[in-house]
Image: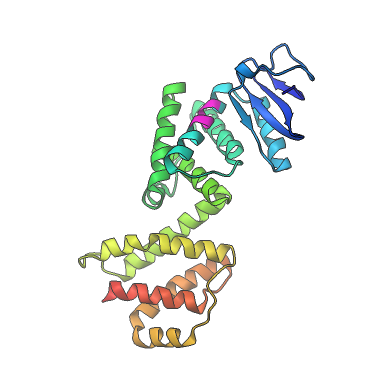
Amino acid sequence: MVIKKVINNNIVTSLDNGVEVVVSGRGLGFGHREGDKIDDAKIEKIYRIENEDSLRRFKDLLAKLPLQNLQIANEVIALAKRELKTELNENIYLTLTDHINFALERFEKGMMFENAILFEVKAFYPDEFRIGEKAVDLIQNTTGHYLGQDEAASIALHIVSAELNEKTSMAFTVTRSVKNILEILNEEVDREIPGNATRIDDMIPIFKHLVYRIILHEQYDGDDVGLYEFATGNCRQETKICERIAGYLEEQFGEPVRMDEKSYIIILLRKLIK
């Protein structure tokens, strides 16, 4: 590989089969210029980001980024891939690196961050949150700065977004929406009834996927009128709770909850009320 452009002493760009890639390694660009051969022994990571805008933003970020912050992000991403046994959207190299860099800058200025959905992230995404905690430990071991569980939750959301190929803002929106749905359930259903607390918690992934379907306009649309009429006719209290949840979701996203989705919610609620 040869250098296409030197970004800084540790970052260069090159071409791999005609596609621009970013190459990092300590001293990789020092004393070099366009056309020089890249020292393979110094290469630590090759980044292949297909989206041109994301690639441009990544290069701009790396031009002013301390190398250790990039290395931290790389280790966290590698850990997530290994422990979750899944591939992550390549954009996480941009989004998570930028986030960690900004979090450290904010910490050094004494600006502490409080994550409003910390509890929900811990409950809804336990595997990703565990990786977020390990990331916070890694940051502390590398920089001496302890960013806390609030930051672990933020890192977890970046990982969730990369798993789902969605923006971090969507993961935040889904988590916040499910939190509000659970608040409705806690107001309407007695958690003290044996088994109810567990049943409510078991509904978390169901409501998560419902909110995603609403955001992506992919609700179930079989329009099973018979099932809906049976459910609403025989489960009056459950229907009332369902309509409250559906009203909240429509207010938030401007899209009515479809008949089949409501039927399923009512049937699930029946187990709680009964």
- Residue sitting nearer the eye, 149 or 9: 9
Q: Is residue 144 visible?
A: no
User: Residue 192's x, y, as percent?
Assistant: 21, 65
Quarter of the image for residue 232 reads bottom left
Which residue is at a point 35% across and 84% down the rendered structure image?
A: 236
Q: Is residue 112 left or right of residue 39?
A: left
User: Residue 26's x, y, as percent?
Assistant: 60, 17
User: Residue 251's x, y, as percent?
Assistant: 53, 69
Residue found farthest to the top: 31
98 above or below 161?
above
203 above or below 120?
below
Residue found farthest to the front: 17
Which residue is at a point 55% across and 74% down the rendered structure image?
A: 256
Which residue is at a point 48% across and 42% down the rendered structure image?
A: 154
User: Residue 110's x, y, as percent?
Assistant: 48, 29
Per the rendered image, the range of residues in magenta is 71-75
**Magenta stretch holds residue 74:** yes
39 above or below 239?
above
Q: Main secondary structure of the magenta part?
A: helix
- Residue sitting nearer the eye, 137 or 71: 71
51 above or below 237?
above
